[in-house]
Image: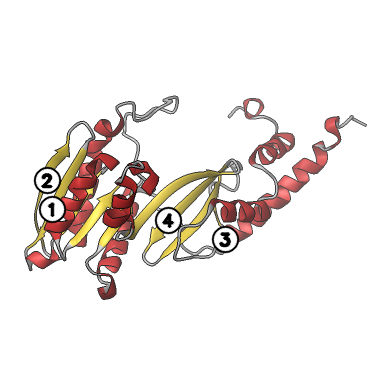
Amino acid sequence: MKQQPFGTRGRTGVRASLVLLALLGLAARCTQALIPSTPAEQTRRAIRSLRDAIEQEDQKPQRLYVDYLIPLPPETKAEDFDPWPGGLAQMYPYAEDILKEILGGVVDDPGSCSSQILSAPDCCGFFCQESKTSPENDVAAILFPSPDQLDKIAEIDAMVGDRTLLLFNRQFQRPADFGFFGGKGRSNEIVFDRFRWGFAFQESACRGEDVKLTYETPEWKSCVICDENRELGTQEIPLLPPQPSRPLYEDLEKTINKVLPEPLWMRKMGEAEEKGFKFQRGE
């Protein structure tokens, strides 16, 4: 009998197969994709979520965050270490087109969309989508706002008044990003105490797994992406139940440990044991 090194070779393959079968069953129960499959779908879902948020009368004036996952540029190659070597300056024209399309979809009977650069070094811009129906239905947005634009955010907030204002792909996450000499307190007053989520599509790494988070009014959803098995294809495995607040890392990790007890490296090893390594299979 051929010796099994490490004493787990056979069991690993069996466990991995059982896990993958369980994942297939979970994914089959999902009638609708948890995450956008194309940039066009992401845009449509962002528009729908923002329209739903804006229609909530008890939340006016609407101050909304948008986290949009900008697709990689068409010239990106698989071997590229950094698909955005130019940073925000390279992203800006792509994000500008996306934002204008979203604004045009959010506003009923859209008119012209004006824009101006707020800070060239920080690649921060301001956009205002006019409504032909009424100026009250105009929607404004700040693209790539950073902590350095806190005064500008306050100025634009006052100018917009009761109309909707979006912070699109903000470059800060918490009050501490604004420093500790008054900036932290002012950021709470101007931003964090007033803005809420309008749409989000985010990527995160948790326990080495590819986790996706989405916010579509009024709830967050989470899933883990499994694509290590070519026969099953890419699977979206739901994690936490839909919830009003963004899922915590600890809760995601606990759930991943339940639905995916085998870590990714072990699942890949199990596939290699059953089918051989990719170079042996000619892939």
Left/right placement of residue 185 relative to residue 220 reads: left
* Residue 27, label in figure: none
Contact (Cβ within 8 Å) of mark 3 with mark 1? no
Q: Earlier in the sequence, mark 3 or mark 4?
A: 3
Element marked by disc 4:
strand
Front label number (2 vs 3): 2
Q: Disc 3 marks which amino acid?
A: Ala
Disc 1 to disc 4, how far (Cα)?
Answer: 25 Å
- The answer to whether residue 173 is seen in the rendering is no
Question: Disc 1 or disc 4, which is closer to the eye?
Answer: 1
Q: Count residues near mark 1 (Cα–Cα under 10 Å), then give few for <14, some for 14-19, many for 20+.
A: many
- Could you say whether the residue bearing mark 1 is in a helix, strand or loop? strand
Tell me whether circle 2 and circle 1 mark residues in contact (CB < 8 Å). Answer: yes
Kindly identify the amino acid type of the residue bearing the numbered disc 2.
Ser
**Left or right: where 129 falls relative to 4:** left
Q: Earlier in the sequence, mark 3 or mark 1?
A: 3
Residue 214's label in the rendered image is 4
Residues 89 and 191: in front is: 191
Please give the residue where the numbered disc 3 appears in the rendered image: 28
Q: Which residue is mark 2?
A: 115
Cβ–Cβ under 8 Å for marks 1 and 4: no
- State the image coordinates of residue 238 (x, y, percent, origin top left): 55, 58
Q: Is residue 130 above or below residue 202?
A: below
Q: Residue furthest bottom?
A: 58
N-terminal of the two: label 1 or label 4?
Answer: 1
Q: Secondary structure at mark 3?
A: helix
Mark 2 nearby-residue class (10 Å; few <14, some 14–19, many ≥20): some
Residue matched to label 1: 128
Q: CA gap, disc 2 to disc 1?
A: 6 Å
